[in-house]
Image: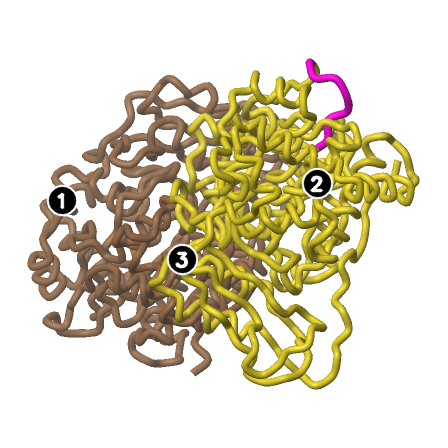
Chain colours: A brown, B yellow
Amino acid sequence: MRAVEIIERKRDGLELSGEEIRWLVHSYVAGSVPDYQMAAWLMAVYVRGMSMAETISLTEAMVDSGERVDMSSVPGIKVDKHSTGGVGDTVTLILVPLMASAGLVCAKMSGRSLGHTGGTIDKLESIPGFSTELPLAEILKQAAAVGAVVAEHTAELAPADRLLYALRDVTGTVGSIPLIVGSILSKKIAGGGDAVVLDVKCGHGAFMETREEALQLARTLVGVGNKLGKRFSALITGMEQPLGRRVGNALEVSQAVQVLSGEGPDDLREVTLALGAELLALAQEESDLTYARNKLEAHLQEGRARDKFAQLVRAQGGDERILDHPELLPRAGRQEVIEAPRSGYVQHLDARSVGLAAGLVGAGRTEKGAAVAPDAGVELVAKVGDQAVAGEPLAVLHVAQDSLVGQAAGLLREAYTIGDEPPAQPPLIIDAVRSEE
Amino acid sequence: MRAVEIIERKRDGLELSGEEIRWLVHSYVAGSVPDYQMAAWLMAVYVRGMSMAETISLTEAMVDSGERVDMSSVPGIKVDKHSTGGVGDTVTLILVPLMASAGLVCAKMSGRSLGHTGGTIDKLESIPGFSTELPLAEILKQAAAVGAVVAEHTAELAPADRLLYALRDVTGTVGSIPLIVGSILSKKIAGGGDAVVLDVKCGHGAFMETREEALQLARTLVGVGNKLGKRFSALITGMEQPLGRRVGNALEVSQAVQVLSGEGPDDLREVTLALGAELLALAQEESDLTYARNKLEAHLQEGRARDKFAQLVRAQGGDERILDHPELLPRAGRQEVIEAPRSGYVQHLDARSVGLAAGLVGAGRTEKGAAVAPDAGVELVAKVGDQAVAGEPLAVLHVAQDSLVGQAAGLLREAYTIGDEPPAQPPLIIDAVRSEE
């Protein structure tokens, strides 16, 4: 096979065979197809799109570029979760112990991705002593014992994704549905879960800004995912304003503990329960979402999910006293209060600007391998619908990195729109996409 | 400026500014924009196309990537010619001395391109002693003295084209009109001619297979070219069957001498005269093509063009005795006759297959820097409309390279379609595109 012919066929809008896609992906990973040919192909895919069959072949080829996690030695139903990424996305920290409290096994493997705020691994590492670098044997042992693990990828899952993502990032080919689907699903298929819930964020703080785009992505994800031998469902959830009231690593851990303790922000609890119910029903092949949701809500209220979180923290070497004493979590030395410029109701709170502000004071990383500040971030005193009083705090910046604090404060101030009338609340759960079978 | 943003804009079908295109081309030539970003951009251009203004900017940026030939020290009107490439395209060998015989200066600079058969430089080098590696001072001196020169590029004209063409070749982005236009025109604009005639070949043996494609290319070439300060016209000429009856280096030289001597194939003479008349009228800013054509025809008949060719050969160190004694040209040691499998009329003669066959016995090069066999090629005994007699020769392969002769003979045999009725002659001059001004 010749790369240039495969590029030309896709360029002309023809459907590629599974064999062609497999050959191309594997040759690229092996280094025999160079970056420039792959870049031309990615652009052709971006513009021409891919059929369902092609997207399935792409995902399979990406899975086969690396190892698969074998969790068959762990009893029980294994579940997994993926979010397309938002601001204040604390859901995983709550969902993992919650699913374990319901008798499922949730071994979540993540990478240290780039972003304005850290990933799940970065968040948990803000807990003193918490370790995420576990060998696979340890992950399996903890999965069997606790039912909940959050660890870095031990094996390299879908290395094709790492290579392709780096190339897409510099060639204007990130925002292509089949390429996004290949990227997300390849890691979920290679991972150990039997049932996977996908949280497709939608709004100005997310990758997919409109409901239509989010729905198209969710449908393709679920359609392709279910063809590949695992059970997938997706919820489309709102990301106009940040979820919860805290954005940043230790800040989100303390907020997760609040929700696990029956407190904390309603929107974060609501989205977590909706995703959890979806995943529980999917895992148990039941269709009664109300029953699933009630069960999980009870686990939250009764503190069973909180207990699982404590076990998870302890099992991974973390200081579980943070559950009762959140002051043991790192706290930034400097707080910068953003005051309301006028009184009124918060009409809009721009998630993207909040994320950027958190990044500017140290909460995220823009370069691979860089450290994140565990204590940096943003606390949102007021969210959409809340009353603001001129001169009173709207938000607090937790500053770990001083150099750009002025810019961060400016962004955060501009993130708020304050008006006279109480606004409508932005929707939390926008849509659900489930298998047609 | 950032390459990824320019890629994204083109990907989304937006029009790029001249500044963006210039920056991208120059950064690519300078090595600061890598191949993979350029490859993605080329694919976006292929799919989305380019406006006239963008194509002009691209061509200008490519011209500015190298030097320009300054022929202002040579008196007279300087003319140039370009063909998009065909099989048996002996036109340049005749046209250069013909234009010089009409008082114009034709200093043709060519490269050693890849192809089934050699380029103009390769053809002339089959004349014993003929040298094409002339320093610029020598080119200018000969241009002033003889009015005709054929030499290799001394300065590197439009190096961006060399880099871009190599990348297009392996990324499925060759067949894009704006990219083809930038490639052709950048070298013509950087070259020394004031007026340029373009021979856009059309048919199965050419890059543009349909009249519509050829017309679109010709219109863009002439439109963009005339915006860049030189006079351009184009003819669309037929390339279903090869032009003339000889394909190969020395074979084409001997055929050019025939035409210059008032003999030789009608189709080759006809196309040469049409292009010559077009170029003469363009150079002298006259519109009377009949007058121009009659003048050139007289120069051919009177042997004035032949004399110029003799001067050209002598000036470049070649053995001018080949004009009277074509047997002094290299001749392959082996001739392989292709016989007609049946009697009838030649209905179709596939130019591409003839070109491939000539290449297989040694007439061309598929790798940069490789030598071409001066004596290899194909003699077409029968062309479309000719009568074939079973067992009599249709064509003769001149074999310099034995290994693939069986394959070449098979291709050549299959290139002929013989039927009972005399066919219509394929058109020679299909259309003309001239400046609208």
Which class describes the residues within 10 Å of circle 1: few (<14), some (14-19), or many (20+)?
many
* Chain at tag 3: B
**Of the pair A261 and A415, the residue shown nearer to us:** A415
Residue closest to the eye, B394 or B293: B394
Indicate the amino acid at tag 3.
Gly
Please determine if labels 3 and 2 lie on a single subunit. Answer: yes
Is B283 on the left or on the right of A333, as rendered?
right
Q: Quadrant of residue B93?
A: top right
| Of the two numbered discs 1 and 2 in the rendering, the one whose residue sits closer to the viewer | 2
Q: Which disc is residue B333 wearing?
A: 3
Residue at position x 68%, y 79% from top? B345
Q: In this rendering, which labeled residue sits more in front, label 3 or label 2? A: 3
Amino acid type assigned to the residue bearing label 1 in the image: Ser
Q: Nearer the viewer, mark 3 or mark 1?
A: 3
| SS at mark 3 in the image | loop
The x, y position of residue B208, in whole percent, is 65, 57
The disc at residue A131 is: 1
- Magenta stretch, main secondary structure, is loop
